[in-house]
Amino acid sequence: MSETNSPTPKGLMEKIEFYFIGLAFTLLGLAIQSFKTTQIFKQDFLETSGWLLLLSSGLIGLWKLEWLPILLHVENEKADKEQIVDQLRKIASQGIRSVKISNENRTAEITEVASLAESSLNKIKDHSKKLGKRHGIKHATQKYLFIIGISSIFLARSYPVVKEILKTMKII
């Protein structure tokens, strides 16, 4: 079996992102379409709050998707720089003292080139860490808004039933 047919983590992540955003907007649309206004403020408030939470979840998901290519690009750039640094270390360990820099048409000390490459790698790692942290915050926010939104709509829709059950049990 060819390796190109097997799913990649990045591809799976993108599919899950699209599914989750689609689910948030689909449920929002269904909730709005099937809404019947009541004269109970708490119930209507819970319902409309759920709509806003689902909308927010979907919009944050779209915001995450907007930044996903940038995050993946920085991760690829980091992997490339790590490979270059490893190659330079390997070359230096073989006793080679200088390398030719083709785009400047000059030679430079391997330690100088390795130092510049490591400095560049560290900057990319810092940038990647910041982007990853922001992505994680957006993901957690999206997830919790979705859960709270669904819960809010569920509570609004089940409010009359729960109220009747509590009345029959003489709790309220």
Image (tube, rainbow, N blue to C red):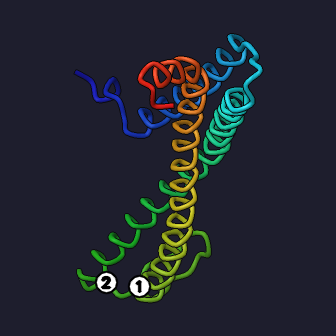
| Residue located at (31% from left, 83% from top) | 96
- CB atoms of marks 2 and 1 within 8 Å: yes
- For mark 1, what is the residue? 110
Would you identify the image quadrant in which residue 93 lies?
Answer: bottom left
| Residue located at (50% from left, 22% from top) | 167
- For mark 2, what is the residue? 96
Nearest the eye: 46 or 58 = 46
Q: Residues within 10 Å of mark 1 (few under 14, many from 20)?
A: some
Q: Which mark is residue 5?
A: none
Would you identify the image quadrant in which residue 159 lies?
Answer: top right
Tell me where residue 105 appears, x and y as whole percent.
59, 75
20 left or right of 59 in image: left
Q: Residues within 10 Å of mark 2 (few under 14, many from 20)?
A: few
3D distance between C-alphas at marks 2 and 1: 7 Å
Tell me where residue 55 appears, x and y as whole percent.
69, 33
What SS does tag 1 mark?
A: helix
**Amino acid of disc 1:** Ile
